[in-house]
Every structure is written in C-alpha cells, then in structure tokens.
Amino acid sequence: MRKRQVVLRREEPPRTTTNSSVTVRSVRYGECQKNHAAAVGGYAVDGCREFMASGEEGTSAALTCAACGCHRNFHRREVETEVVCECSSPPSSNRA
C-alpha cells in the first residue's frame, strides 16, 4: 500500500477585503531527484517514484523517505492551489 503525504495549509485573507475567500494549498511530494552520481561527475537517480514518510507527522522521521532514505527536499514538490470564494452576489436591478 502506498503512503501519500499531503500538507494542507489555509491562508486567511487580509482583514481589509470585503470578500470572504480562503486559499487552500495541498502539497504532494513526487519522484526523488537526488543525483547519486554527483561526486563522480555523472547523473543517476534511484527511481523512487513518490515520497513516503518513515515516521509519524511531527517527528524527524517524517522528513525521511521510507523508500529511498532521502530527505523530503530531494523529492519534486507539487503544489495545488484552490481559492474558495464565499462572495455574495451583487444586488440585481429590476427594470420594467
């Protein structure tokens, strides 16, 4: 079974705006991009396809990949941003 780490972060809008909107970002870590042959001037990756945390959230082991042993920063970061707007519709003008 594959483990997938998703980090959700909410950003509150500035208090000066009249619209009520919230930005939700989900972060996913993809394939490992660590160059294991950099010391000899080559390029070789290990083929790890997705970050899987070694430990529970909040521990230092959560930043280490269980599949390849690399730090999470070596994995490609994918950010998906969604803006949720709870705007009220402008008043409609009734013309006869």
Image (spheres, helix red, strand yellow):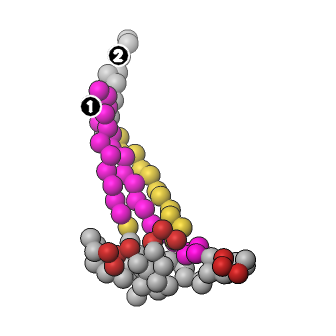
Quadrant of the snapshot with the C terminus: top left
Depth check: give the residue in front, 86 or 35: 35
Q: Mark 1 points at which residue?
A: 15
Q: Can residue 58 be seen in this view?
A: yes
Judged from the image, the secondary structure of the residue bearing numbered disc 2 is: loop
Q: Which residue lies furthest to the front in this view?
A: 39
Q: Label 2 sits on what residue type?
A: Asn
Q: Is residue 33 magenta?
A: yes
Q: Which mark is residue 24?
A: none
Residue 66's x, y, as percent? 42, 85
What is the spatial separation of the Cα atoms under label 2 and label 1, in whole angstroms? Answer: 32 Å
Q: Where is residue 92 in the image (x, y as percent from the top left)?
A: 35, 21
> In the image, is residue 84 above or below residue 17?
below
Residue 52 image point, x, y percent: 42, 79
Q: Nearer the viewer, residue 69 or 95?
A: 69
Q: Is 37 above or below relative to 7?
A: below
Q: Is mark 1 on a helix, strand or loop?
A: loop
Label 2, on which residue?
A: 94
Give the residue drawn at x 58%, y 75%.
34
